[in-house]
Image: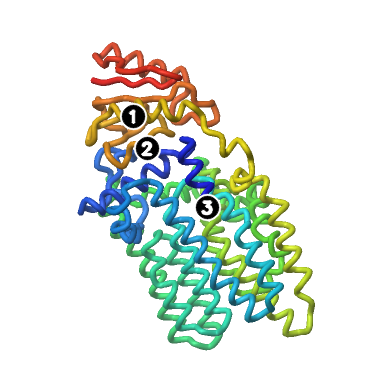
Amino acid sequence: MMLSLRIHQQMLSYSYDLGIFEQVVRSYAEGHLPVSELRGPDYPVLGEHFSPILALLTPFYMLWPSPMLLLVAQALLIAISMVPLTFWARRALGDEAAAFIGVSYGLSWGIAAAVGFDFHEVAFAAPLLAFSLTALGENRSRAAVFWVLPLVLIKEDLGLMVAVIGIIIACRGERKLGFLTIAYGLGATALEMLVIMPALAPSDSYFHFSWLSSSGGNGPGDLLYRYTIGLITPQQKITTLLLLLSPTLFLALRSPLLWVALPTVLWRFASNLSSHWDTFGHYSLVLMPIVFAAFIDALRKRRARKGSVRRYAVGAAAICLLLLPHFPMWKIIQASTWRTDPRIAVAHSMMSQIPDGATVQTSNQLGPHLTGRTSVSLLGYFSSRPDPQWIMVDTWVTPDRRWPLNAFQEKSLLDNARARGYRTVDAREGFVLLSR
């Protein structure tokens, strides 16, 4: 929580995605279906990802209308997910092993990456999966199903995880409950992707199917490659897969609970969007409860056969600590994280000149500081509403954080805006504020 809030305070969070999610929750608080101006004028977000569970944040947002609420909520949801897994490990493996596993999970790289990159709806899935897989590991099938029923309200593809849980239950002999769970998961995903979302989306189709379709121009041949050899190439995919299993010293492979991760791993590796393949951002957050539940299940079976579990628990913690410096959570102990750049006060001073309710185009990092009280879109983004009342940019953004414009494009747009009648209201410390 401290790290996420600090990153936002340093103006290192992004309109894509923290600003978008605040616009979604703000829409619910204002009493209408969620739209995001950052995605496009009055863009219906439920047509892009089916995440109505975000409405649960509405009463809290009405009390604290800030993007920081979303960051706090994400941290709390992740913290809650630690509880069932740690207590299951304690019951099954003893206090010492449970302590190591709890620490390992909390420091695992999927969580360490997610908390350093804004807020995402999949944070709601972490505790639900943790409670469900704990129940499944303890042969409480009805409780396991109960906990995963809301997954279909978090993201449209998570119904496939529900279906896999149903398969595991059916294979254990509870066929009626298992088949009902399979039907629920598959039916919900099909309904959302093929009916609800196309009805809401501007394109009249499920946009993200394009990630999974042919991209090489070779039709069926390209698809065949991508869904066979393409699932393990390029090497980036193998690296991510190894990192997923390494915190458990690959012992998670001995548990059927690991199968629950398969749908997410498959669609990510089959995608033609390279950011889905690696360890960046939030994409692996939803996999961490599954991997560690499978780890506990495998250790439980090992202990039942009088095998040692201590070295596995200690090894898991050691690996998570070794990987941690490569992920954003490591910033929490770096001095630069806690130094305040004087430019931040300048930026807030300039933003205070923009009245509530105004239409604004901004740099990516400035957007989340305005989405709570103005209508924000990105300067230079192809779907942004034209001719905003205000434009504010940070011209000193480092190249690695520039998106969607490079410095030359940004300067050209500012010069063009001035030529069209925008006046410079303020310009300090690299920030430029224009008004129409």
The reply to whether discs 2 and 3 touch (Cβ–Cβ < 8 Å) is no
Residue 287 placement, left or right of 27? right
Q: Quadrant of residue 312?
A: bottom right
Residue at 57% x, 46% y is: 280
Kindly state the secondary structure of the residue where label 1 is placed.
helix
x, y percent for residue 427:
38, 17
Distance CA(mark 1)–CA(mark 2): 8 Å
For marks 1 and 2, the one nearer the N-term is 1
In this figure, which residue is indicated by the disc labeled 2?
369
Q: Position of residue 58 (x, y in %)?
A: 29, 57
Q: CA distance from mark 3 to mark 1?
A: 32 Å
- Could you say whether the residue bearing mark 2 is in a helix, strand or loop? helix
> Of the residues under marks 3 and 1, which one precedes in the sequence?
3
16 sits to left or right of 96: left
Q: Would you call the spot at circle 1 few (<14 residues within 10 Å), some (14-19), or many (20 or more)? A: some
In front of the other: label 3 or label 1? 1
Residue occupied by mark 1: 351
Q: Is residue 127 above or below residue 389?
A: below
Dot 3 corresponds to which residue? Answer: 283
Give, as a three-letter code, the residue at label 3: Tyr
Along the line of sight, which residue is nearer the eye, 260 or 375? 375
Secondary-structure class at tag 3: loop
Q: In the displayed structure, would residue 110 be above or below residue 173?
A: above
Residue type at mark 1 is Met
Going 44% across and 84% down the picture, which residue do you hit? 177
The mark nearer the N terminus, 2 or 3, is 3
Q: Which of labels 2 and 3 is toward the front?
A: 2
Q: Are marks 1 and 2 in contact (CB under 8 Å)?
A: yes
Image point 27% across, 15% down: which residue? Answer: 423
- Quadrant in which the C terminus appears: top left
